[in-house]
Amino acid sequence: MGSVMGEGEGEPRTAGRRRICLLGATGTIGRATLRALVRRGHEVVCFVRPGTVGDLAGAEARRVDVTDPVSLTRDGFRGERFDAVVSCMASRTGAPKDAWAIDHQAHLDVLSAAREAGAPHVVLLSAICVQKPRLAFQHAKLAFERALIGSGLTYSIVRPTAFFKSLSGQIDRVRRGRPFLVFGDGTLTACKPIGDDDLADYLADCLDDSSRWNRVLPIGGPGPAITPRRQGEALFELTGRPPRFQQTPLAVFDVIIGGLGLAGRIVPSLAAKAELAKIGRYYATESMLVLDPETGRYDADATPSTGTQTLFDFYAAVVAGAALPDRGDHAVFRD
Ligand SMILES: NC(=O)c1ccc[n+]([C@@H]2O[C@H](COP(=O)([O-])OP(=O)(O)OC[C@H]3O[C@@H](n4cnc5c(N)ncnc54)[C@H](OP(=O)(O)O)[C@@H]3O)[C@@H](O)[C@H]2O)c1
């Protein structure tokens, strides 16, 4: 990936209605980002999978196979001009093959097509955990981050902490009077959870705010860092149930990872399951906060905050009857 500017590229504009290509508009953060972009008056063209049914409110939906560079150009960009690409697209499983195909290769192809379309700015939803890469999907994301940084286009790489949906896997358990499961004593890790709409606003504002250009931007939600134990306590308070925690040994993951890893040498689908168990172990032991490279410690104070939505307000809304979000394939605890 060279750093020579393509024809039509230049400085992004900081104001006015712009023409945006949005990827991943059917996902959790993508849906919120679409709303945020439309609220700001932008013209949004979403590239969605060929099989996707229905339309996206306030935006044009184009059926595109993002794994096929020909489809990206022919069905997606269509030789038209765009002011920016915003990507909330990510592999749904985090399994190695899918991660390298979507988080890396499809994004590289989007980058090439975006340059041809003269789009001067790419806003990328990444993840804070790539600062300590141990998993295939983190390496895939980092490899694309590097390509984007070296592309010569203006970039805003947003690395959020944990989403609310990823911290809501035990609401039903607690509601049903079952104990809240924790690893260790429930204080091994912490995060500054960020709400979908707050993150979407942050992503959309990257278009206007030149202080967010050509930067890697770790970002969390408001308030102090929260441990799993604190999440459990909040749920017991909200449901009016007496606190009951059940400690799960981390060795559970090692047994699963070891067993599936061995079996995966014979049955490839089991190797993918071993990777999912590794993802579970990673989140059980690593905080979603900025990592201090000097000390190797996670630093809540160094993790920037945005927005107003809190995890506990979200819990309160769900306990009061709001719909639980689809947590996807990354949930560690299922009911
Ligand atoms: N969960 C967390 O706590 C957390 C924290 C920090 C960062 N992140 C990062 O945030 C990102 C997005 O998260 P999310 O929860 O919004 O994702 P999501 O709900 O899983 O949505 C993923 C989006 O990517 C699209 N996509 C996936 N595979 C595709 C393919 N083969 N072809 C076309 N489109 C495809 C999906 O389209 P379809 O609807 O068609 O599948 C969907 O629009 C990920 O990079 C994740 O690592 C997550």
Image (spheres, rainbow, N blue to C red):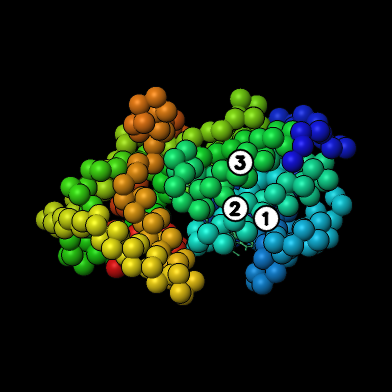
The answer to which of 209 and 309 lies nearer the viewer is 209
What's the residue at 42%, 61% (across, down)? 276
What residue is drawn where x is 60% and y is 44%? Answer: 143
- Name the image quarter holding the N terminus: top right
Q: Which residue is mark 1?
A: 106
As drawn, is 217 to the left or to the right of 66?
left
Where residue 3 sits, quadrant-wise, is: top right
Can you say whether 4 is above or below 281 in the image? above
Q: Is residue 249 left or right of residue 256?
A: left
**Residue flagged by tag 3: what amino acid is it?**
Glu
**Tag 1: amino acid:** Ala
Q: Position of residue 271 (x, y in %)?
A: 45, 67
Residue under the image location 50 percent in, 58 percent down: 94
Image quadrant, ligand 1: bottom right
Seen from the viewer's position, the closer of residues 269 and 62 is 269
Mark 1 within 8 Å of ligand 1, using the beta carbon = yes
Q: Quadrant of residue 7?
A: top right
* Label ID, residue 103: 2
Q: Earlier in the sequence, mark 3 or mark 2?
A: 2
Check disc 2 and report its element: helix, strand or loop.
helix
Amino acid type for the residue under numbered disc 2: Asp
Q: Which mark is residue 145?
A: 3
Q: CA distance from mark 3 to mark 2?
A: 10 Å
The 10 Å Cα crowd at callout 2, few under 14, some 14 to 19, many 20 or more, is many
